[in-house]
Image (spheres, rainbow, N blue to C red):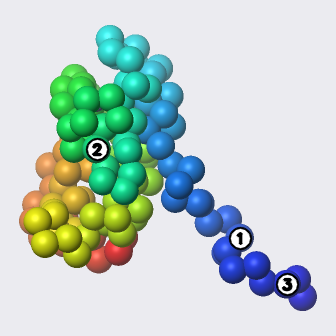
């Protein structure tokens, strides 16, 4: 038996997630803006470049197609768990379903679906 260090094997350290990962995943679609500047600043989840709530308007303005949606889905689901942990429970902050809808803006997500997703990522 190996000694248990407190971190589960294979778990991703949340502090290592940043928008650069998402940006480099998006880059092959050749978008005309430098997305790597637009990173998530934790724990407030504001863009480190323009101070807007992350994902900021630069991300939200990307022209969407199916292949970009697939890339965004893979990248932004990584943010859900740490974002919900950081943002939930603040009196003026977003609810977990609102956080889900904010980070998955590129998908048509109903309130019911957002609640179901939030329960899985809390
Ligand atoms: Zn930004």
Q: Which tag is nearer the camera, tag 2 or tag 3? A: 2
* Residue at image point 16% right, 64% down: 93
Q: Is there CB contact under 8 Å for labels 1 and 3?
A: no
Q: Secondary structure at mark 2?
A: strand
Distance between mark 2 and mark 3 Cα atoms: 38 Å
- Mark 1 surroundings: few (<14), some (14-19) or many (≥20) residues within 10 A: few
Residue 66, percent from left and from top: 29, 33
Q: Earlier in the sequence, mark 1 or mark 3?
A: 3
- Which numbered tag is attached to residue 3? 3
* Residue at image point 18% right, 31% down: 57
Q: Secondary structure at mark 3?
A: loop
Residue positioned most to the top = 32
- Mark 2 surroundings: few (<14), some (14-19) or many (≥20) residues within 10 A: some
- Mark 3 surroundings: few (<14), some (14-19) or many (≥20) residues within 10 A: few
- Which numbered tag is attached to residue 46? 2
Which quadrant is the C terminus positioned in?
A: bottom left
Q: Is mark 2 within 8 Å of ligand 1?
A: no
Residue 55 seen in the current view:
no
Q: Earlier in the sequence, mark 1 or mark 2?
A: 1
| Side of 2 where 83 appears, left or right | left
């Amino acid at each position: 038996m190996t000694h248990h260090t407190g971190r589960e094997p294979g778990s991703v350290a949340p502090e290592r997630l940043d928008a650069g990962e998402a940006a480099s995943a998006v880059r092959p679609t050749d978008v005309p803006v430098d997305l790597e500047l637009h990173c998530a600043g934790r724990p407030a989840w504001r863009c480190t470049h323009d101070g807007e709530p992350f994902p900021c308007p630069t991300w939200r303005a990307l022209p969407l197609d199916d292949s970009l949606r697939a890339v965004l889905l893979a990248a932004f689901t990584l943010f859900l768990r740490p974002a919900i942990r950081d943002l939930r429970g603040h009196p003026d902050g977003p609810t977990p379903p609102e956080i889900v809808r904010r980070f998955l803006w590129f998908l048509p997500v109903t309130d019911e679906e957002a609640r179901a997703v939030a329960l899985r990522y809390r």
